[in-house]
């Protein structure tokens, strides 16, 4: 039986990657005199990959990676004005209004009436708290966990603390790497709801042969899926 449902936040309940892409375009414009967009993007992704273990996930780490990349592609000659623009772009991202994705509120509301629902997200603590407060969804969740990373051990601990164990838990999100694969490894259910934009560091292959993996086109189908799984496994 499924007793607890975890929801990812960014690009599952509200838009996120779209704002990173807009800032990347702005970043490319600032450095157009030094390099083309494609190699710049490759260097930025490489910097993010190097830095995620130091800075964590979120806007602040992204901003620092942009500054590092700007120094690299200009051979340490990047103008201070460009650095100032990069910092301003990061600050604007931290103030951007929340845009809920279709069916997000309806899905959380419906499942909160019959299950324990949790918000499980990674990233900067202050930014994630801001987005949750602005989303208007906060009162629907029975618990909120903002973690530094999503691993099988993290999921086991969260679902033991807030529910009846990971084996009776389901996690839904847009990232196969963070929201699906670790919870499957921990023994839970993983539901993938793809988003049109996915961060390069979150790409992974679908575990199509796993019996506890499901994929849905949108969150609107989630309540019916949970009901079907419940009926199927009802003693």
Image (spheres, grey):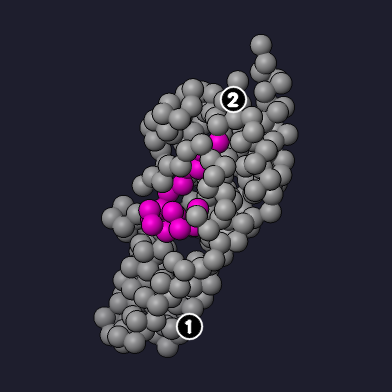
Visible in this render: residue 174? yes
Q: CA distance from mark 2 to mark 1?
A: 48 Å
Q: Is residue 60 magenta?
A: no
Residue placed under numbered mark 1 in the picture: 29
In what element is the residue under mark 1?
helix
Q: Which residues are magenta?
A: 117-132
The outermost residue toward the left is 76
Residue 113 lies in quadrant: top right
The disc at residue 2 is 2
Residue at image position (67%, 31%) is 226
- Assess whether mark 1 and mark 2 are in contact (beta carbons under 8 angstroms): no
For the residue carrying disc 2, how many other residues have a C-alpha within 10 Å: few (<14), some (14-19), or many (20+)? Answer: many
Q: Earlier in the sequence, mark 2 or mark 1?
A: 2
Query: Height in image: 59 above or below 223?
Result: below
Residue 223 lies in quadrant: top right
The outermost residue toward the top is 235
Residue at image position (42%, 49%) is 122
Classify residue 215 as left or right of residue 118: right
Residue 140 is situated, as x and y percent measured from the top left of the image, at: 57, 42
Classify residue 16 as left or right of residue 45: right
Residue at image position (43%, 26%) is 160
Query: Height in image: 228 above or below 78?
Result: above
- Judged by depth in the image, the label closer to the viewer, 2 or 1, is 2
For the residue carrying disc 1, how many other residues have a C-alpha within 10 Å: few (<14), some (14-19), or many (20+)? Answer: some
Residue at image position (40%, 77%) is 88
């Amino acid at each position: 039986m499924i007793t607890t449902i975890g929801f990812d936040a960014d690009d599952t309940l509200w838009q996120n990657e779209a704002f990173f892409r807009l800032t990347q375009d702005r970043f490319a414009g600032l450095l157009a005199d030094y390099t083309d967009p494609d190699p710049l993007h490759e260097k930025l992704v490489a910097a993010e990959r190097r830095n995620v273990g130091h800075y964590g996930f979120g806007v602040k780490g992204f901003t620092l990676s942009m500054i590092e990349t700007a120094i690299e592609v200009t051979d340490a000659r990047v103008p201070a004005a460009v650095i100032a623009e990069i910092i301003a772009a990061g600050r604007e991202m931290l103030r951007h209004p929340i845009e809920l994705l279709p069916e997000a509120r309806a899905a959380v509301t419906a499942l909160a009436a019959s299950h324990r629902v949790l918000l499980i997200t990674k990233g900067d603590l202050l930014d994630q708290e801001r987005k949750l407060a602005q989303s208007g969804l906060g009162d629907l969740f029975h618990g909120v966990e903002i973690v530094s990373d999503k691993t099988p051990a993290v999921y086991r601990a969260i679902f033991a603390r807030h529910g009846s164990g990971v084996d009776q838990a389901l996690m839904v999100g847009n990232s196969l790497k963070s929201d699906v694969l670790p919870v499957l490894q921990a023994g839970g259910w993983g539901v993938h709801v793809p988003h049109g934009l996915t961060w390069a560091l979150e790409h992974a292959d679908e575990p199509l042969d796993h019996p506890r993996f499901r994929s849905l086109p949108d969150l609107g189908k989630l309540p019916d899926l949970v009901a079907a799984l419940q009926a199927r496994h009802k003693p």
